[in-house]
Image: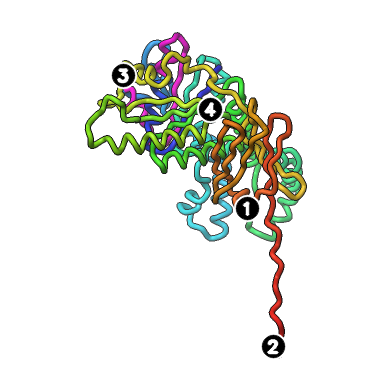
Amino acid sequence: MRVLLFTGKGGVGKTTVAAATAARAAASGRRTLVMSTDPAHSLADSFDLAVEAEATRISDNLWAEQIDAQQRLESNWRDIQEYLVEVMNWAGVETVQAEELSVIPGIDEIFSLIDVKRHVEAGNYDMIVVDCAPTAETLRLLSLPEVMNWYIERIFPVERRVVKAVRPIVTRITSLPLAGDPFFQAVERLHRNLSAVHRILTDELSSSVRLVVNPEKMVIAEARRTYTYLSLFGYRVDAVVVNRIIPDTVTDPYFGKWKEIQKEHLATVRDSFEPVPILTSRLFDQEMVGVPLLLQMADEVYGGQDPTAVLFRDEPVRVRRRGGVFVLVMRLPFVSRDDMDVHRRGEELFVRVGSYKRNLILPQSLQRLTIREATFAGDHLEVLFAKAPAQPTTRRPADG
């Protein structure tokens, strides 16, 4: 089964591109489900049809689903939330405030993505297209299982036994509520579900992320930052879709300056993301609503390519700690080692090896460090980051 996730800054046309991709896949004979995890759903608007919280048939081989995030939150988080609210009530926090504080930002969309696991396991579709919320925070949070593994495997069982053992004593000396079996069962269930979703979405053979951008400075900057974090957490981007490009057929002088600006931004996109394929779509003279127009847009974006194929395979950018330094590892196949230039400017890392160029936004953990050296290990470039050496202090001569 193929899983495609579309993400990008709000307002770039992400939902339309996702819906167009799904329509094209369904038209080729693949049973396709397009699902929205964005709390501000707009899939129904794209298809100009009512879309429910469960799979709704749109056309032959095409279904759509607008997930009820609140419902998924209550079914997956309720037992954990009830205990957290009870503890905060004990600490003096009002119930309404405690309920709001007990919900981690972005957690509702994580539970929406658990529906991906449900559909993959059911096997009713050949392809699942996910219209994500306009942020990569959710995909970053899906790496929580890696952090939770050590706790779940070692500390969690001991903690559960300890709570049962000390409960009779603690209840005599304090009114502090202790977690019960429903809480521990909910934590275990959450860990299993998130681990399964993470495995599915980081499977290089079946799952890919596609970034949707407009040729605008702020949108591209956000996409570059998103790309960095997706790579760090193991998600593979197989294409970047540049949407709403003013076509050459528009000759009105009013749009002349805009076309020049867009041309510059397109060059930035290529420098930042290539060799990841750059797909483009023009600015249409009408809203692309309904399956026929969405198919027209899919032809514009993909041309003769199969939108269900994995359009690009590469190892994500990774950061590892090695002794007292951090090593950023980037795979650079088929490039010359003779002409290499690596430098940084603020939060950006510029890499040029032969004809290969890459411009990355550094994660926050590396922005405070300096580059010590850059070397090749096989076909991987390794950039070493470390703290800057302490500046020697100069002592002022004593007066007199």
Q: Residue furthest bottom?
A: 400
Residue bounds of the magenta highlight: 22-47
**Mark 1 burial class by Cα count in 10 Å: few <14, some 14-19, many 20+:** some
Question: In the shown orientation, is residue 371 left or right of residue 324?
Answer: left
Amino acid residing under circle 2: Asp
| Mark 2 or mark 4, earlier in chain | 4
State the separation of the CA atoms marked 3 and 1. Answer: 57 Å
| Mark 3 or mark 4, earlier in chain | 4
State the separation of the CA atoms marked 3 and 4. Answer: 27 Å
Q: Nearer the observer, disc 3 or disc 1?
A: 3
Tag of residue 276: 4
Amino acid residing under circle 1: Pro
Quadrant containing the N terminus is: top right
Residue 365 position within the rendered picture, expressed as x and y whole percent measured from the top left: 62, 49
Q: Nearer the observer, disc 4 or disc 1?
A: 4
**Mark 4 burial class by Cα count in 10 Å: few <14, some 14-19, many 20+:** some
Residue of label 3: 293
Residue sitting at 40 percent across and 21 percent down? 301
